[in-house]
Amino acid sequence: MWLSHGCVKAAASCVGRRLSRAVAGRRKKSHAASAFMPEAAGFLGVRDHGGLQEFSISQTESFWAAVARRRLEWITPFSDVLDYDMERGKVRWFQGGQLNVSVNCLDRHAHSNPDKVALIWERDEPGSEVKVTYRELLEMTCRAGNLLRRRSVKKGDCVTIYMPPCPLAVASMLACARVGAAHNVVFAGFSAEALAERIRDARSSTVITVNESVRGGKVTPLKSTVDAAVRNCPTVRQVFVVMRTDAPVAMTPKDVAMEEEMMSEDTVCEPVTMDSEDVLFLLYTSGSTGKPKGLVHTQAGYLLYTSLTHKYVFDYNDGDVFGCVADIGWITGHSYAVYGPLANGGTSVLFESTPVYPDPGRYWEMVERLKINQFYGAPTAIRLLLKYGDEWVRKYDRSSLKTLGSVGEPINTEAWEWYHTVVGEGRCPVVDTWWQTETGGICIAPRPSEPNAEIIPGMAMRPFFGIKPTLMDAEGKPVTSDDASGALCLAKPWPGMARSIHNDHQRFIDTYFKTYPGYFFTGDGAHCSKEGYYQITGRLDDVINVSGHRIGTAEIEDVVNQCSAVAESAVIGCSHPIKGQGVYAFVVLKQDAQNDDLTSQINNTVSSKIAKYACPDHIQFVQRLPKTRSGKIMRRVLRKVVERDVGDLGDLSTLDDPAAVQEIIQGHRDLCGN
Ligand code: WTA
């Protein structure tokens, strides 16, 4: 069917301070000139990127209005550019405007360039890629949209998508947009319980999944995970099942054979007219409490922002092949494998495999075979591949590469240098892009489309158009001096920002707008050099970043505490040479607990309730946790123990029982050595 045999065609560390400075990959003059924003032509007197950046900050509304008129296809033009009240977490862009996102991503390109390749599905087995043109993707989306509509999915509904990266997953996302439903893509590595929690919170009526996923040669029965999840989800009426492999799958009365039913649907599907601020999707992410938050993104602003950043951060030009290897279950996959590239009429790679399957040359063999021009990946994968040596890279022709991107966590200088000199042969600018699920698109990054732009290894560098970062000091005041650090806030709204947390707008206000009134608080710390270049130094809250995936320590603690033998626990991030951060759990057992195989019990619980990547790398069993007299766990002490920085533990005067700290230090030495 569409998925299994390639028949798509037939059916239609915080980074250390900078070490060296490099002007990476100077662009040729003619190229740079052509890359300069055509949108800028309308801005009188703005002749270069610097001028445009200033204009985008001083006249934000004029800037975004001009860009929105030019880049998006509107059904009804907007009447109001921006309406906001940051203290109430209220941000509205392009009100009065109406459009359909799937029309912007598909119809206009299918009309002008029907045979252009929209997606290259890079399946797990190298060399078995499937290309899908704009005409085919539009047809697939229309059939899926008609099916959703026939099965009563409409505006106001939410469809949960639990699928690996594949064309039908993208068509499903766009089909939701076509009929006006929101989508909620859940990363297909999440467990049944984590999936059920997200389905319930989103109140989804419909789930779309595959029989099995195939990744790194390993087959995983996703449908049975969905079966287990929906048993506890009363809102789910129907589950659409797509066949990724030939393996038969047991169908329940709720299940619908998606591809089969799509065959009898029409290839034309009338798009619903949506308001700019209608919901496009929810995407759940971890916060510093145990409950994941469903961030809400809306139509026009999100699409515009992903389209503009995709074009200018990566210097994407017509005809380029864009290779974002992130899974569609994360925001990076949403913005830079799906919406940004498709809004721009580009060719986007959907990567189903892993960086080391069948061997550590996979990425570069794929670059050679698909002639990828922009490659966008994660530091954790770069660090892993670096260890396998340069041969795996040099074996393959990478001359197609023009820009290399990095996302998800700080990229250490060693990995940056390797990416730049070995992978990119010193020719390609490396863009370290800082952003979040909340920001919708890239906010701080070098801009290689700018002529001779300076790039410093390990630095995210400069704000994107319309973005105004502000660093806050310990008193909550904006830092005014040069060369300073602080809590990273964004001072102005931008079109791509999330608009709310699903079902909990108060949490949205409390998390992002309360700490520094009038500003959006990112939760990250940053340093700004005297040249005005930013370097992200890591999270300031209890969220850790494991292989570029966010996870709240409270979320892991909640689950560890559910193990019958566990009395309480404290989870801390620890440095990890490949993953960036690993998970370190301090666990206090109940008095009569049996000690047998507790480590695997804890690991199994975390992987079945959350996902494998959240499993602790180290579990230290302790008699008690260091607590203040008021009963609060002193996490900074645990952090220092884990980072082996116990020389100065700071003020311990409020500690209830100082002996607990010594026990923990000794236990850590026993577990991890000195
Ligand atoms: C971290 C991923 C340093 C940061 C797009 C942020 C980064 C969190 C970078 C968001 C970067 C992302 N340098 N840190 N270039 N990019 N981060 O929501 O802590 O999965 O707050 O979005 O990842 O993770 P999320």
Image (cartoon, rainbow, N blue to C red):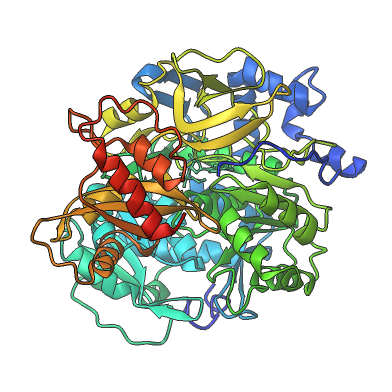
Name the spot of residue 520 as percent of width and height, x first: 45, 25
Count every numbered label the image shows and give the total.
0
For this view, does 264 lie left or right of residue 333?
left
Q: Nearer the viewer, residue 481 or 152?
A: 481
Q: Is residue 211 above or below residue 339?
A: below
Q: Is residue 672 shown to the viewer in this render?
A: yes
Which quadrant of the view contains residue 225?
bottom left
Residue furthest toward the left? 592
Q: Is residue 617 shown to the viewer in this render?
A: no
Which quadrant of the view contains residue 40?
top right
Q: Nearer the viewer, residue 505 or 293?
A: 293
The residue at 24%/79% (across/down) is: 251
Name the spot of residue 87 as percent of width and height, x first: 37, 17
Residue furthest toward the right? 29
Q: Is residue 357 above or below residue 495?
A: below
The residue at 34%/50% (across/down) is: 666
Name the spot of residue 69 as percent of width and height, x first: 61, 31
The residue at 50%/17% (across/down) is: 473
Q: Is residue 315 above or below residue 123?
A: above
Q: Nearer the viewer, residue 533 or 154?
A: 533
The residue at 77%/47% (across/down) is: 429
For this view, does 281 lie left or right of residue 135?
left
For this view, does 388 lie left or right of residue 590?
right
Name the spot of residue 598 as percent of width and height, x first: 23, 66
